[in-house]
Amino acid sequence: MRGSQLLAGEFFTRETRRVARELIGKWLVSRIGGQLTAGVIVETEAYLPRGDSASHAASGRTPRNEAMFFEPGRAYVYAIHARFCFNVVTEAAEVGAAVLIRAIEPRVGLEVMRQRRSGRRSAIPSDRELCSGPAKLCEALGIDRRLDRHDLSLGKQLWIAESTASGSERVALRTTPRIGVTSAKELCLRYVWADHPAASGPKSWR
C-alpha cells in the first residue's frame, strides 16, 4: 500500500461498466476502530442506470437505495441476510448506478480480518477465502450500513486507491454474467481477475 494514491471522484463519474473494469487491481482500504485492513480488488459487478432490472435503482429512489442517487464516489452499503454488501456510486448524481465490489485479495491486516470473520481461524479454509465474496469482504473490512453514503474521496474510514509503485501488477480481465441475480442475468457485467484464487463463484468462472 505504500505509495498508493487515493482515487478522486472523477474516476467514478465515468460509465459504470468502465469503472467496474478499471477497479480490478485497485486497493480497497478500511480503517475502522483504528484497525487498518486492505486488499486488492479482484472481482466487481456493474449495475447500470438503464436497461438493468437487477439494479436496486431500477424501480426508482427509495430510502434503502438513496445512496445510489448521490454523487459518484459515495458508498452504497445494503444489508442482505444480516450481512452487508458494498458498492461505489458511479456516473452522476441522480442517475442511479453503482459497482458492487465482490471480492478482494486480502493483503493488510489479515489477523484483524480473521477475527472479524467469526474469530475462528479454523472456520476459514485459507486466507484467500477471507474476502472471496461481497458479504465476506464487508465482514472482514468492518463495513456495515453506518458507511452507507460515505464519501470515499475523503480517505477516511473507507476508500479506494491505486498504487503508484513501479512494476504494477498486470491484470488479465475476464467478463461473465453476474452471480446470484434472477433478473437480467444474461447481461455480462461481472468483471474478474482471471483465474485469481480469491475471486468468488465456481472455479470455472475465475
Image: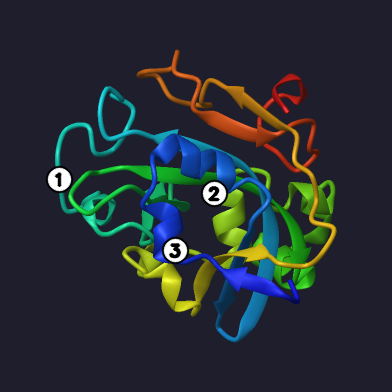
- Please give the label number shown on residue 197: none
Which one is earlier in the sequence, the residue at label 3 or at label 2? 2
Locate the C terminus by quadrant. top right
> Callout 3 environment at 10 Å: few (<14), some (14 to 19), or many (20+)?
some
Task: Tell me the kind of residue under disc 1.
Answer: Arg
Residue nearest the viewer, comparing 129 with 206: 206
- Quarter of the figure with residue 54: top left
Task: Tell me the kind of residue under disc 2.
Answer: Ala
Which one is earlier in the sequence, the residue at label 1 or at label 2? 1
Q: In the image, is residue 184 above or below residue 162?
A: above
Q: Position of residue 141 (x, y in %)?
A: 60, 65
Which numbered mark, 1 or 2, is in the foreground of this view?
A: 1
Tags 1 and 2 touching, CB below 8 Å:
no
Residue labelled with disc 2: 135
Residue drawn at x 43%, y 71% is 153
Locate the N terminus by quadrant. bottom right
Q: Position of residue 77 (x, y in %)?
A: 39, 56
Q: Position of residue 74 (x, y in %)?
A: 36, 62
Residue drawn at x 57%, y 59% is 139
Residue labelled with disc 1: 61
Residue labelled with disc 3: 144
Residue nearest the viewer, comparing 34 with 152: 152
Q: In the image, is residue 47 above or below residue 61?
A: above
Q: Position of residue 155 (x, y in %)?
A: 50, 77
